[in-house]
Amino acid sequence: MKHLKAYLISIADRLKGKEIFILRNLSQRGIGFFVESASFYPDFILWVIEEKEQNIYFLDPKGIRMLGNFQDNKIHFCAQTIQEINEAVNKQLSREKSDYNLSFAF
């Protein structure tokens, strides 16, 4: 968190007009995703809000070093499944003629 705070301070000029929130997600009880035969609870959830656009980032600082290989369900989820969720949510928002745009990323 100290490194993130220092980074955000260092780019403060690029963050004008944006609100940033971070949530420490609870392990096995917080917001989770269930993929194939595994579950995934990101360590942190970061929201960046600018006007009517929200970008939501799911952060897992330990990265892939704890995974067995690049075929891991978590990697597949982050590389492909999250994009499918992103498209489905924005398609629904479009059908509802919402003024909001939502984006998910890992």
Image: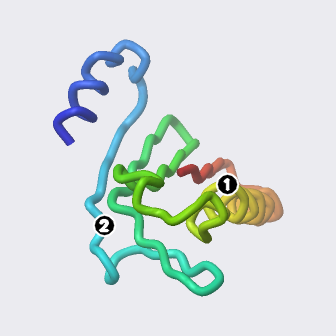
Kindly indicate the quadrant of the structure image that contains residue 92.
bottom right
Helix or strand or loop: what does disc 1 sit on? helix
| Above or below, 93 relative to 40 | above
Q: Say which mark, if any, is on residue 11.
A: none
> In the rendered image, which residue does mark 2 sit on?
25
Task: Where is residue 63? Give x, y as percent.
Answer: 43, 52
Q: Say which mark, if any, is on residue 79.
A: 1
| Above or below, 87 relative to 48 | below
Query: Could you classify mark 2 by the number of other residues whose Cα lies within 10 Å: few (under 14), some (14-19), or many (20 or more)?
Result: some
Query: Could you classify mark 1 by the number of other residues whose Cα lies within 10 Å: few (under 14), some (14-19), or many (20 or more)?
Result: few
Residue 59 visible in this rendered orientation of the protein? no
Nearer the observer: mark 2 or 1; the answer is: 1
- Locate the N terminus by quadrant: top left
Which amino acid type corresponds to the residue marked 2 in the rendered image? Asn
Outermost top residue: 13
Could you tell me which residue is drawn at 54 percent across and 82 percent down? 38
In the foreground, 52 or 81: 81
Which amino acid type corresponds to the residue marked 1 in the rendered image? Ala
| Residue 11 located left or right of residue 106 | left
Helix or strand or loop: what does disc 2 sit on? loop
Disc 2/disc 1 C-alpha distance (Å)? 21 Å
Could you tell me which residue is drawn at 58 percent across and 61 percent down? 69
Residue 73 visible in this rendered orientation of the protein? yes
Q: Which comes before the other along the chain, label 2 or label 1?
A: 2
